[in-house]
Amino acid sequence: MKKNYLRVSSFKYSYHEGTNPDCRAQRLLADAATDNRKLLEIVGECAELEDLWSRVRCENDERWCLVVNHDEHHAKMEISETDFKELKKVKLSNGEDFPTLKDYLKQGKKDKALRLVVEIKPDKTKEKEDELTAKTIKMIKDMKLGGQCDFISFSLNICKEIKKLEPSFKVQYLKGELSPQQIKEEGLDGIDYHFSVFQKNPTWIADAKALGLITNAWTVNDVAVADELKKQGIGFITTNIPDQLKK
């Protein structure tokens, strides 16, 4: 029987409906929002842990170090315009080192059952997006993690570039303005939209499923909204309250 899944948005993790509430990973969520390495270290300690979610940005030094960060800035530095040697001088608010994509991939590789959801952030030009995408895909393939990764982006160009570089990779679009039929025509694998998009377009989940597309809604922190999405047949739900939505 097919089951729905929960993704924990703020903490980069997804949880299966059967997640053990006593799992160390789940207990740590409340105080580990910025503790990237602590979250990585617990990968594999809970058999039901499903997805590690990393957001990839580039920075501008000659080695093209790929870093993991939600926003465009680290401290007051714009990541895409700052050398990594400067970025890494400033630790995270909890005292941890500024994380790289390789850090995440090395940890994720330790648990073969773990799905790694990689979000590649948009950049200022198509050329920069293409280079960022190519470097990310190369690192993942060099580390032999292609079969363990899924990809998402707000940039249609990045999504299409991933499929061009590696057609077998699963890619979902985030922005929300394209219908399931348009996503299918673009050659992508799914829609990963804000829940309000599905409220405005109540047939899109069914339409997507009929086209064989993956469906995800973010970020759902309301039980009633989650229940309605489940009734419509949503495949995945991104949330900050997995315990409540599992009930």
Image: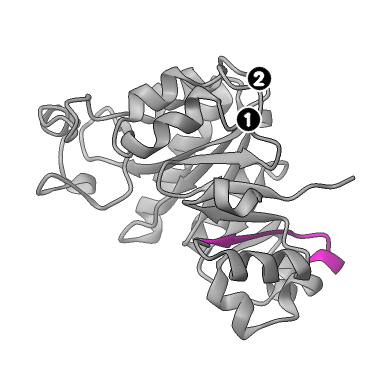
Residue 158: within the magenta? no
At label 1, the amino acid type is Asn
Residue 217: give its label.
none
Q: Which residues are magenta?
A: 209-218
Q: Residue 244, position in %: x, y?
A: 56, 52
Question: Mark 1 sits on what residue?
Answer: 20
In this picture, is 6 found above or below 90?
below
In this picture, is 89 found above or below 153?
above
Residue at 49% x, 27% y: name it. Answer: 25
At label 2, the amino acid type is Lys
Disc 1 on helix, strand or loop? loop
117 displayed left or right of 132: right
Mark 2 vs mark 1, CA separation in Å: 19 Å
117 displayed left or right of 246: left
Q: Residue 82, position in %: x, y?
A: 15, 41
Question: Mark 2 sits on what residue?
Answer: 112
